Amino acid sequence: MTLEAFYQKLLNPPKPWNVSKVEISEDGSRVDVWLTHEQYTFLCSECHCPASTYDHMPERVFQHLDTCESKTFLHVRLPRVNCSKHGVKQGVFPLAGQYQDVTYKLEAKCIAVMEACDRTAASEITGVSWERLGGIMNRAVKRGLERRGDIPPLILGLDEKQVFSRHRYFTIVTDPVNHCVYDVITDGRAKKHIEYWFQERKEMLSKVEKATMDMSASYYSLTAEYMPNATICFDHYHVIAIMNKAVDEVRKQAQSEIKDEDARKAFFRSRMTFLYGEENLPEHLRFKFEQAKSVSAATARAWEIKELLRGLWKVTKDESELRVYFKKWYWRATHSRLKPVCDAAKKLKRHLQGIIAAVLHGISNSATEGLNSKIEVVKRSACGYRNKDNFRTAILFHCGKLDLMPTMEG
Ligand SMILES: [Zn+2]
């Protein structure tokens, strides 16, 4: 069997392509394969209608899957066709897209590897450079977003995410039902900076039935304006985050009042234990937690009030009963003589309608929490992403649940 016949069998190129020449480098690390075709009617790359061959472009080289660990490249002179509708256009090449330098098969492999590990490791495994993998990731996300189109999520979540530095934020638009990121707005969280995203999608957003978010005025106002049919919900995650912040403020105040340095340090070391819910506190931290509670009765009280609020999600699904529960809780919180707790309670009361809506509609926080930690992994694995557009692409690639794989059309 000749080398050409061997590669013809191995590659099995679709009609009318045939392997006409194969060259293997001296050290065997590289294989170059030339493909040519017989007389044929190709499809126009614009409309996919058959058209007669007009001429051929200069030779292009596409990297393909390795053969026996040797980098393998396909050399092709792509045909141009004379389409009756579009004039002279490139003909469809079934092995690779017209603006790419890798074949569909290698591209699909790179995507699968990048889904499983970070880009540096993916580059080592696939032999494709870090920069080219970036291009593949970009195309995959663009393709995925185009395929998804503007189908609105049933529930739309708005969440801020701190990136790069303390004062830079992204707005993460989530689809909590499908546990994925719907889009990433890289211009911050202030209404004036991100309103364009909502304006561009006015029609799609009018179909959203429920919207879940934190209690910032910006997200509230954008939702009221662009999602007129959506019930606004403040989910468990964001409500408890406000109370956790209040508990932490009480804890900090108490800490500053401890005179003995060792006692102060010990109290500081147990600060994280106050962020746990009662049932989630790990057994090995319980002693530390009880000790910390005995050091500061005020922090212990703030924590208990936070725990009572969590009860709102457990007691009932009846609106009037929920209001009674909250009223009792509110009285207790506002009579706690703890200013941060009082302030948090007042804030929650102003948003009570949305909190109750979240309980009644069973809006869960697991999606928000899960996605947050997934985004953190993306951030870490890319050493912090200096460029905001690349970071957006990486978030959508890993958390967007998009259909990323190339097909013959690219
Ligand atoms: Zn055409």
Image (tube, rainbow, N blue to C red):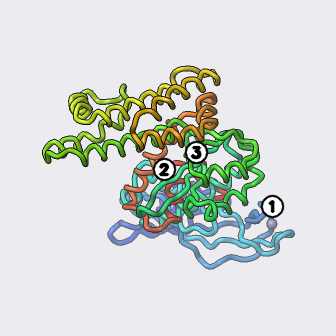
Label 2 packing within 10 angstroms: few (<14), some (14-19), many (20+): some
- Which-is-in-front pick, marks 2 and 3? 3
Q: Position of residue 225 (x, y in %)?
A: 73, 52
Label 3 packing within 10 angstroms: few (<14), some (14-19), many (20+): many
Q: Which residue is mark 3?
A: 213
Respond yes or no on whether mark 1 lies under 8 Å from ligand 1. Answer: yes
**Relative to the observer, which residue lies in front, 84 or 46?**
46
Residue 50 seen in the figure: yes
**Relative to the observer, which residue lies in front, 243 or 66?**
243
**Relative to the observer, which residue lies in front, 286 or 349?**
349
Q: Quarter of the picture for ligand 1?
A: bottom right
**Relative to the observer, which residue lies in front, 150 or 185?**
185
Task: Decide which of tag 2 and tag 3 comes sooner along the chain.
Answer: 2
Judged left or right of residue 4, residue 321 is right
Q: Which residue is mark 1?
A: 49
- Which-is-in-front pick, marks 1 and 2? 2
Q: Position of residue 380 (x, y in %)?
A: 37, 55
Task: Decide which of tag 1 and tag 3 comes sooner along the chain.
Answer: 1
Asked whether disc 1 touches disc 3, contact meaning CB atoms under 8 Å apart, the reply is no
Q: Is residue 376 above or below residue 280?
A: below
Respond yes or no on whether mark 3 lies under 8 Å from ligand 1. Answer: no
Quadrant for the C terminus in the image: bottom right
- Residue at 30% x, 40% y is 272
Distance (Cα) linking label 1 and label 3: 48 Å
Distance (Cα) linking label 1 and label 2: 32 Å
Q: Mark 3 falls on what kind of element?
A: strand
Q: Which residue is mark 2?
A: 112
- Residue at 17% x, 46% y is 259
Q: Mark 1 falls on what kind of element?
A: loop
Distance (Cα) linking label 2 and label 3: 32 Å
